[in-house]
Structure formats: structure tokens, C-alpha cells
Amino acid sequence: MKIGIFSNPGSASTRVSNALKSKIKAEHLVLDNDDPDILITVGGDGTLLSAFHHYEKQLAKIRFVGIHTGHLGFYTDWRDYEVDELIDSLAHDNGQSVSYPLLDILIEYSDGKKQSMLALNESTLKKLTGTMLANVYIKDQLFELFRGDGLCVSTPTGSTAYNKSAGGAVVSSELDVVQVSEIASINNRVFRTLGSPIIISPQEWVRIEPVELNENLMTCDQKVVENRQIKSVTYRISKQRIAFAQYRHTQFWKRVSESFIGVKPVD
């Protein structure tokens, strides 16, 4: 089994990364950052997102493991002081894993060129200045004319990120669905949107067509597309998934509760 390490440059993460390298060699495991079977990310959720996009062409064979060296991460199960326990799990690995849905994105530009992207958390479409006006289609059927700051399209695990801040629902990671949430929509006697998030099934897709092609900004997790005339963006559940090594992978709703509520039972 080949193990890779993807770390942010912080001092705490560098220390943990160096400790991992030493212990991996001591256990006679193979360290391979180019073609890993297991990829350990050291940092936080931002580091894991960066690693996901760095290795997105190799998702079919990689299982991820996250170590957080700062605040509790949503995708990171291990703490920086648990390196020995993680190494023991790696040494006794039997291929166990849990996987989550991803978001396929197809951008069509005004010059006819197309670009495909893949998101772990979400994608947003906004206008750099002023209000975004866009036609929203579901399965090629016009659904609404949106007017507002923008739209956020998220995966189930990404529903806890920007989507939640935009008023979207938190969706179980067991569902292969896409969520579309409005970002500061305008609703009055003249302009009208649904005004609530919508959930799209795996057999459906959403296409957003900005009315004005200039000054649009599209994001895909941490990636940004700007200074391009975007004709349309189509979103659907991807056939690809991200897999995590399930040594002690935290159950989704337990992770949500710990991250946002911190509830404890009453004696």
C-alpha cells in the first residue's frame, strides 16, 4: 500500500507531516505522493479541499484521511497528537472506506468553448457588480428568472458550508442529490423567485444562464472562474465519488452535531 502526505505550510502541520514520514518509514510502509492508495491531508478542511482538486484525476483509487492541526475540521477525523494511532490503523488496513457524492459542473462560454469541473463542497455563480439576473432551468425546462446576489449549488457534505450560511438545508450524506440555494434574492411585486432551497435528484440537472454575460464570477470550491463570458453553467450529481478510509470515520450527523451544536446529554 502506497501512502501520500499533503500538508499545508504551517509550522504545526509541517511538524506532524515530518512525524508521519518518519513513522511510515519505520513501519516499512511505502511513501508515494505521486500515485498513493491512501492520501493523508494535514491541516484542515481547506487543505483537504486542495488535496481533492490536486488528485481529482485519481479519485477512483485514492482513499483520503484527514488530520486537523487547528480548529475541528468537518472532513478531518484525526487530531495532530494521534499520529501513532493512525499509523497503527494504516499498518492494519483492510480496505474499509466510506464515500460521498460529488458535483459535476459544465461551463459553456460565449465563444463556444466548454470546461468541466468537479466540486466536493459547492459552486456559486454571482455577478461582480450589481445584481445577477439569470434564467434557471431544471431538466431543460425553465423554472424561474432569478434576480439577486447569486446562486449556490452544493453537494450533501457541502450543504454544511456556504450553503448553510445562505439559508440552505443540511442534507444527509446518504443522499445522491444536488441542492440549489438562493443568495440574497430579490422578491417583491415585480420580481419573484421560489425563495427557498430546492433539492435535485440524480436523474435531474440544473442549468443557470446569466442574462448579462459580462462580470460574472463562478467558484468551484476554492477555484475561481472570472473575466470570462459565461453563457451557461450546468450542474448534476457526478458519477465519481470521494472515498475516505473508514478507520474511525465520524458518522455524518454526529459530525454535524459536534461542529455546529456541541450538544451533550442531560443527566
Image (tube, rainbow, N blue to C red):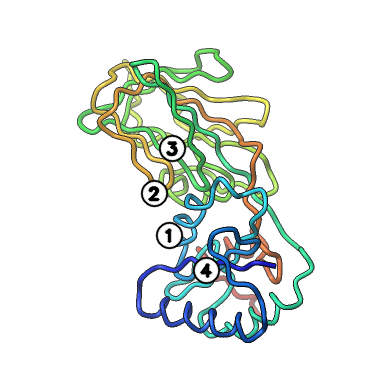
Give me the residue at 45% from left, 18% from top.
144
Q: Which residue position is annotated with label 4?
A: 5
Q: Nearer the viewer, residue 235 or 130?
A: 235
- Return the residue found at the far top: 141
Task: Return the disc, 3 or 1, that comes first in the chain's sequence.
Answer: 1
Task: Identify whether 68 is placed above or below 182.
Answer: below
The Cα–Cα distance between marks 4 and 1, rounded to whole angstroms, is: 15 Å
The Cα–Cα distance between marks 2 and 4, rounded to whole angstroms, is: 20 Å
At label 2, counting other C-alpha atoms closer than 10 Å, the crowd grade (few under 14, some 14-19, many 20 or more) is few
The Cα–Cα distance between marks 2 and 3, rounded to whole angstroms, is: 14 Å
The kind of residue on which mark 3 rests is Cys
Q: Which residue position is annotated with label 3?
A: 152
Task: Return the disc, 3 or 4, that comes first in the chain's sequence.
Answer: 4
- Return the residue found at the far left: 129
Give me the residue at 49% from left, 57% from top.
51
The Cα–Cα distance between marks 1 and 2, rounded to whole angstroms, is: 8 Å
At label 4, counting other C-alpha atoms closer than 10 Å, the crowd grade (few under 14, some 14-19, many 20 or more) is many
Disc on res. 46: 1
Give SS at disc 3: strand
Task: Return the disc, 2 or 4, that comes first in the chain's sequence.
Answer: 4
At label 3, counting other C-alpha atoms closer than 10 Å, the crowd grade (few under 14, some 14-19, many 20 or more) is many
Q: Which residue position is annotated with label 2?
A: 222
The kind of residue on which mark 2 rests is Gln
Q: Are marks 1 and 2 in contact (CB under 8 Å)?
A: yes
Give SS at disc 4: strand
